[in-house]
Image (cartoon, rainbow, N blue to C red):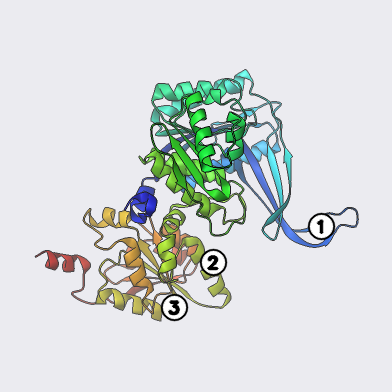
Amino acid sequence: MSKETGDAPAFAAEVESFRGARVVCVGDVMLDRFVYGDVERVSPEAPIPVLHVCRETTVLGGAGNVLRNLLAYGAEVRFFSVVGNDAAGNELRELVHASGSANDGVVIEEGRRTTIKNRFVAASQQLLRADHETLVSLGDLARGKLLGGIEEALQAADVLLLSDYGKGLLVGDMAKRILDLAKKAKVPVVIDPKGFDYDRYRGATLLTPNLRELHEATLLPVATDEEIVAAAEKLLKAVGVNAILVTRSAAGMTLVTKGKEALHLSARAREVFDVSGAGDTVLATLATALAGGASISDAAYLANVAAGIVVGKVGTAVVHPDDLVAGLHERDLLESADACVSLEQANDAVARWRRQGFRIGFTNGCFDLLHPGHVALLRQAKAACDRLIIGLNSDASVARLKGPERPVQAEMARATVLASIADVDLVVIFTEDTPVRLLKALRPDVLVKGADYREDEVVGGDFVKSYGGQILLAEIVPGQSTSATITRIAK
């Protein structure tokens, strides 16, 4: 079975390579402000809704949202952009630092106005967007600082990502000069383009125009698959790039690669709430996958899955590795027990259970070849709580922990078996070696491990105890071990 037709475990293994991918991200950064409220009446002053404001949030937008997605995947990012010497610029630099990335590549330029996008939202729908911005090219001082920093960063990079929002950073010859630096360093380049002059992107590895941008760049019709492929092939030849991934909103994506047959990927979204920042997620997924060693077609497939996930969230959201793995397994999850869920779905369930006063339990493991010892552990865990969540190691995680011959059963097979057990309420597959991120998100009331651990050896135990949670060491059933069973089978 090819990956295109749904080899989820193979793609899930590629997601493992996201962590530690070295990406240089350059682009127009901005502040995304969201004003949330309720609309109950129409203004007497004009035929417009009156928004009763309930809360406001501010997050990194533009290339900053690409940065957020890269960091959520576990990539190592060097980030470069420009802001004005104003309050919004200071806030933006603080947000970059708080995200976990250094902000030394965010250059302050006198006379520039930091870009702000204000979005007003009611019932998960945007009512209005109001922008503050200054669209001017960089001065010589800012250009010099950025180019010097980018040249240095490319010496230890797997991929260069350019996020062009047309706000001034990549206009003129700036994009060409950065591409020349990448060519010298032999680093592949992924670009989200803007405007009509695509010649400045000459020599890039991959461009990601949407339908409107493809039409504007080629002046060709883009209504059908055939027309899109023809327009992309014209652009590919005109600017000398290796591949073009055309994002087509509800119709999915089309990948046109030099010397290969076009690949059409259908949209993966089950329900669309907000398309804000979906292109940023696509760009970050492509770059991180390529940095991790994926082919362009595999990277495009993963980006398509990620886009389907992020449009189901409100605001400029991000996708985590666990979200992507769950998205890859979506068809299997729908066909198996409802207990197999993503971390986001588990969070929703935990919030609902807490409102009902339920005690939340958590345990984790590989659960390869389920045996009576596992059953006893789960029974003791459920006895200590009202709702039990299992954190299940992904296939790649098991292989790192147990060796290349493990697991015996693929992650969805293990998840489906666990979900069928009466004591288990939810199963969440996680890609890391430890369940710490799950524990920090779910904050269970009780964390259960086998008594072959000491309490101070339980991973995440200190965190659970820090907010008043309990550690339970379950009694071990003698003579029960998956490794021992495999050894006996081998003999």
**In this rendering, the label closer to the viewer, 2 or 3:** 2
Please, which residue is most extreme toward the top here?
A: 140
Q: Secondary structure at mark 2?
A: helix
Q: Earlier in the sequence, mark 3 or mark 1?
A: 1
- Local crowd at mark 3 within 10 Å, few (<14), some, or many (≥20)? some
Q: CA distance from mark 2 to mark 3?
A: 18 Å
The three-letter code of the residue at mark 3 reads Cys
Residue 399 on image: x %, y %:
27, 55
Q: Which residue is denoted by mark 2 in the rendering?
A: 348
- Local crowd at mark 2 within 10 Å, few (<14), some, or many (≥20)? few
Mark number, residue 385: 3
Q: CA distance from mark 1 to mark 2?
A: 30 Å
Q: Which residue is denoted by mark 1 in the rendering?
A: 50
Residue in the picture at 59% in, 56% down: 272
The three-letter code of the residue at mark 1 reads Val
The quarter of the image holding the C terminus is bottom left
Q: Is residue 98 visible?
A: no
